Image (cartoon, rainbow, N blue to C red):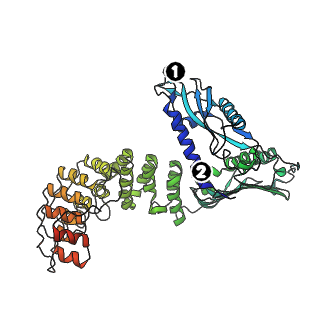
């Protein structure tokens, strides 16, 4: 039977989370051995663990039972202030495994393996402490050892050596790329999806690294391995390694091979190919990859260069962004979700990357990106990013091509943090752009679907009014902030409380009641004595237009005068 990996993955995550939660409930948190060990996070455990996690090998009849081999066993571990494991207790096995002698043996092996793990001391206030946490010990079948040994060929001509690793995509976000290493040290990388740098690129590694990589194939007894180790599941990536020496070639396909007993040497070899070939610099987007691009005389100042800067800003390092910018990559490219490099830097909270982009002129070339970056930073409550963006705007006297100031952009985002930060610089709150629009108008228009507490247009309107924003300033079309408030009833109420003229008309004769589309806004206006008999320049009342444009809920409010039903 083919087993969908998504179901197994979800089950495994739930199992581990529930096990960790159960363990955490009994762990004291004050950090002293007298009162009990500190419960530490998974991330802290990862940072302190020395070496990789052990694997428990057990007999398997068919090699296709997904549990416990896939999810492993959760073991509660306690370590002393020196980082030595003092106790390990295995939780319940996943799935429907009986609590029998075989189960007890597997759990015992997992506990023994956990006791052999070493950690750097966990510290609090500069002193080592007792710590407790959960580790997931992998349980896998015994390795399928080669039945026949095939001698590894001697390398007579290094120019004939070609080594390759392809990691394919999966249902999720698995990096999809291919890396090929030639005997002369030439490396060819091709990035497809979910990698920081896409496309075909070339680099060079040392002769010593090439020799070390061939030795890794030899140590894995590579030519003796099976051609494929394939588990009967779906949605997983496939890893295909290969080597050719003087015409003698060998390939190994790994599709969740460890689940069915693939030798650990294969996985280790795959990791070694990545390490020695420099695959990480491409897949993760580091400055080393940019150096390789320079060596191949790649055209940075191109549409491809713009897209690469977007991709690296999304998933790469600040150093790589700096190198790409220095090499001439355009700053205004757009990628997935229509995001620019500036937006990704804000999304990730990478202030160093943000500085690089702003100093290179990204904000001036793409003012829309400043607005979006402010919104993203505000949603994530990343005040350092907000401060960086606002400081940039204030220091440059920023105005975009439409004459919008930083306060207008911050107000348009609806982000409280952003507006607060801009107001600290005491800007002109009634400044108008080329169309006569103010920050208050920018804040009043629209209705955000986000539930982020940092997006609150009504509160933004109130703080702008408190800062001296004029509620009845008009743009070139005669609109006021209240006339602009078409959807958000809380904004309409805040403007009315701030002194907005409820019956003001624009050049087309429209009032806020005529212009709004929301029944909630209409009701707030009516409840505050808006004149429903006013007609626009075409002689139409609010009710006439609601009927004309089939705004049935607004029409119901205008006719009945009753508060609309909650939608």
Is mark 1 in CB contact (under 8 Å) with mark 2?
no
Residue 52 located left or right of residue 15: right
Q: Secondary structure at mark 2?
A: helix
**Nearer the observer, disc 1 or disc 2?**
2
Quarter assignment of residue 195: bottom right
Residue lying furthest top: 34
Q: Which residue is mark 1?
A: 33
**Above or below — where is 108 with respect to 210?**
above
What residue is shown at x 54% (from left), y 37% (from top)? 20
Residue 330 located left or right of residue 515: right
Q: Which residue is mark 2?
A: 9
- Quadrant position of the N terminus in the picture: bottom right
Q: Position of residue 383 (x, y in %)?
A: 36, 45
Residue 340 located left or right of residue 567: right
Q: Position of residue 37 (x, y in %)?
A: 52, 26
What residue is shown at x 38% (from left), y 44% (from top)? 384
Q: Secondary structure at mark 1?
A: loop
């Amino acid at each position: 039977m083919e087993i969908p990996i998504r179901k197994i993955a979800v089950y495994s995550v739930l199992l581990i989370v529930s096990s960790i939660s159960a363990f955490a409930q009994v762990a004291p948190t004050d950090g002293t051995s007298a009162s009990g060990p500190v419960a530490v996070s998974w991330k802290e455990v990862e940072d302190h663990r020395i070496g990789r996690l052990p694997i428990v090998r057990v007999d398997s009849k068919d090699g296709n039972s997904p549990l416990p081999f896939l999810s492993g066993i959760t073991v509660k571990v306690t370590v002393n202030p020196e980082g030595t494991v003092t106790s390990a207790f295995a939780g319940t096995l996943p799935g429907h495994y009986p609590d029998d002698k075989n189960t007890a043996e597997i759990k015992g092996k997992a506990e023994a393996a956990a006791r052999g793990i070493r950690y750097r001391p966990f510290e609090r206030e500069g002193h080592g402490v007792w710590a407790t946490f959960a580790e997931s010990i992998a349980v896998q079948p015994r390795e399928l050892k080669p039945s026949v040994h095939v001698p590894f060929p001697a390398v007579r001509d290094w120019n004939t050596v070609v080594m390759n690793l392809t990691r394919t995509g999966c249902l999720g976000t698995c990096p999809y790329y291919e890396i090929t290493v030639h005997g002369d040290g030439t490396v060819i990388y091709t990035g497809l999806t979910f990698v920081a740098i896409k496309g075909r690129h070339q680099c060079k590694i040392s002769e010593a690294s090439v020799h070390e990589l061939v030795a890794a194939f030899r140590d894995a007894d590579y030519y003796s391995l099976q051609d494929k180790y394939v588990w009967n599941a779906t949605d997983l990536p496939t890893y295909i390694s290969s080597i050719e020496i003087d015409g003698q070639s060998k390939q190994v396909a790994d599709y969740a091979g460890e689940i069915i007993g693939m030798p650990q040497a294969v996985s280790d070899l795959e990791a070694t190919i990545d390490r020695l070939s420099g695959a990480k610099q491409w897949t993760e987007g580091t400055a080393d990859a940019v150096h390789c691009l320079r060596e191949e005389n790649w055209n940075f100042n191109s549409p491809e260069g713009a897209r690469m800067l977007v991709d690296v800003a999304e998933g790469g390092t600040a150093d790589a962004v700096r190198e790409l910018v220095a090499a001439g990559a355009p700053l205004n490219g757009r990628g997935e979700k229509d995001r620019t490099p500036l937006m990704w830097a804000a999304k990730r909270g990478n202030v160093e990357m943000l500085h690089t982009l702003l100093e290179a002129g990204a904000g001036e070339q793409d003012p829309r990106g400043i607005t979006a970056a402010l919104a993203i930073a505000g949603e994530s409550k990343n005040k350092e990013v907000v401060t960086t963006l606002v400081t940039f705007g204030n220091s440059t006297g920023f105005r975009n091509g439409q004459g919008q100031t930083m306060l207008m952009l911050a107000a348009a985002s609806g982000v409280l943090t952003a507006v607060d930060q801009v107001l600290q610089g005491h800007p002109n709150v009634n400044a108008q752009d080329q169309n006569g629009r103010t920050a208050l108008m920018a804040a009043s228009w629209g209705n955000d679907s986000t539930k982020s507490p940092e997006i609150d247009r009504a509160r933004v309107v109130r703080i702008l009014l408190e800062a001296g924003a004029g509620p009845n300033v008009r743009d070139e079309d005669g609109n006021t902030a209240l006339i602009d408030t078409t959807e958000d009833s809380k904004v309409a109420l805040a403007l009315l409380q701030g002194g907005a003229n409820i019956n003001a008309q624009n050049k087309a004769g429209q009032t806020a009641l005529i212009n709004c589309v929301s029944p909630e806004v209409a009701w707030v206006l009516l409840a505050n004595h808006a004149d429903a008999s006013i007609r626009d320049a075409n002689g139409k009342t609010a009710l006439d237009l609601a009927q004309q444009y089939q705004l049935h809920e607004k029409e119901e409010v205008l006719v009945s005068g009753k508060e609309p039903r909650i939608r």
